[in-house]
Amino acid sequence: MIEAFPPQCYTRAMPAARKQYRRTRKTPLLLVWLLLAMAFPAGSQTVTKSPLDLDGRPADPFRLAGSKLVVFLFIRTDCPISNRYAPTIQELASRYGKQASFFLVYPIASETPEQIRKHLQDYSYHLPALRDPDLALARKSRVTITPEAAVFSADKRLLYHGRIDDWYIEFGRARRAPTTHELASTLTSAIAHKPVTTTDAPAVGCFIPGLT
């Protein structure tokens, strides 16, 4: 242990001790600066992560879709409303699959690839699944709820974001059958190169944490 000399003891009579003390005091500071420089090199920037496939590799759904429309369905494994929409999502993907590429997006960072694979199996999904742990796709799609849809043109323009249809009036309260079909209407218009009349609609479901 190095004992610090009080200010009144720094006299001309002790130059060697004073020099040794200053050198020892500076050493930890220099070490800290060195470690910080190694951890954060000059010019480094925070890089936004891309969505990941279930093997942990970065994925580019727009490149995978080619010239097709891109449809993101944001879901989570533990959301009951998301799970009730599984047959509807599968039907829409089957109906519009030639003109649009559908992707399931899991925005909850704590959901592991193993949990997601089990979820896909449990609900008979046959669609590509992406993880969005840093919410890059959620923010790009302007969604806040699961289940919620986002439709992009091939050139990455957001055409629609919101509910799949109006089946749910509020959490825990649903109609016998939906009366409006916003996602299907959007796809029908976009495929026919017609204007999308409804560009957003409020969704009902489970909130996506971490967006605020």
Image (cartoon, rainbow, N blue to C red):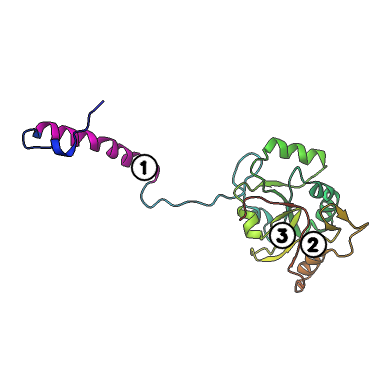
Q: Residues within 10 Å of mark 1 (few under 14, many from 20)?
A: few
Of all residues, the one furthest to the top in this rendering is 1
Q: Quadrant of residue 29?
A: top left
Q: Which span of residues is magenta-colored?
A: 16-40
Q: Which mark is residue 183?
A: 2
- Circle 3 is placed at which residue position? 150
Residue 27 spot, x, y in % from top left: 25, 35
> Quick check: 42 left or right of 187?
left
Q: Is residue 32 magenta?
A: yes
Please say if 48 is above or below 1.
below
Is residue 69 visible to us here?
A: no
State the SS at label 1. Answer: helix
Q: Position of residue 155 (x, y in %)?
A: 64, 65
Marks 2 and 1, the one that precedes in the sequence: 1
Amino acid type assigned to the residue bearing label 1 in the image = Leu
- Quadrant assignment, res 96: bottom right
* Camera-side residue of 97 and 27: 27
**Label 3 CA crowd tier, 10 Å (few <14, some 14–19, many 20+):** many
Q: From the image, give the main secondary structure of the stretch colored magenta.
A: helix
CB atoms of marks 3 and 1 within 8 Å: no
Q: Which residue is mark 1?
A: 36
